[in-house]
Image: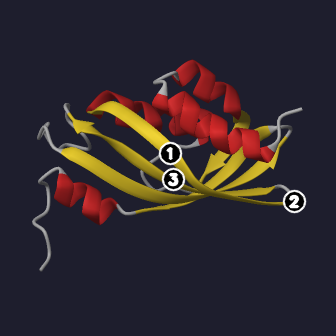
Amino acid sequence: MTTSRSLADGFATTLSDHDLDAFASLIHEDCVNHNRYAEPGKAGVIAVFGHFLDAFEDFRVEVDDVIVAGDTLVGRYTYRGRHTATFMGVPASGNEIEMHSIDIWRVSDGRLAEHWDELNTLELFQQIGAIPELR
């Protein structure tokens, strides 16, 4: 049986390994994603992370913290990579990025079934040169 902690670690490992098939195996068939950038369903979750893998060379994910309560999994993650291809309409800058997230998942049948997240996208877009840094 898959534990919530192993799902949190698997999330980071499969993305760091750039293994979308293994990542997809963690996602419930009826997944609901509340991320405004994602299309609905499991395919939408996979597409969002596939876009990150395509746009950021050496994309890697580190687990900073995990909290499990019942069927809820909360993970804090740090993402790093080099911006080497177009990301959300922004051409490759060659810049290194570091992004942080807080992800909340509902777990069902040993898979990630529902997702909410908060990302520091302002800093991400500043790092790739899409938005000037605020002073």
Residue 45 location (% of width, % of height): 54, 39
- Residue 109 location, quadrant: top right
Disc 3 crowd rating (10 Å Cα; few below 14, some 14-19, many 20+) is: many
Quadrant occupied by the C terminus: bottom left
Give, as a three-letter code, the residue at label 2.
Gly
- Can you tell which of label 1 and label 2 is closer to the viewer? 1
Q: Secondary structure at mark 1?
A: strand
| Residue position marked by numbered label 1 in the rendering | 62
Are dots 3 and 2 in contact, CB under 8 Å? no
Relative image position of residue 63 (x, y in whole percent): 56, 49
Asked whether 101 or 116 is in front, the reply is: 101
- Residue matched to label 3: 77
How far apart marks 3 and 2 lie (CA) works out to: 20 Å
**Disc on the earlier residue, 1 or 3:** 1
- Residue designated by label 2: 70
The type of residue carrying mark 1 is Glu
The type of residue carrying mark 3 is Tyr
Q: Disc 1, disc 2: CB below 8 Å?
A: no
Look at the numbered discs 1 and 3 and tell me whether their residues touch, using CB distance below 8 Å: yes
Which of marks 2 and 3 precedes in the sequence?
A: 2
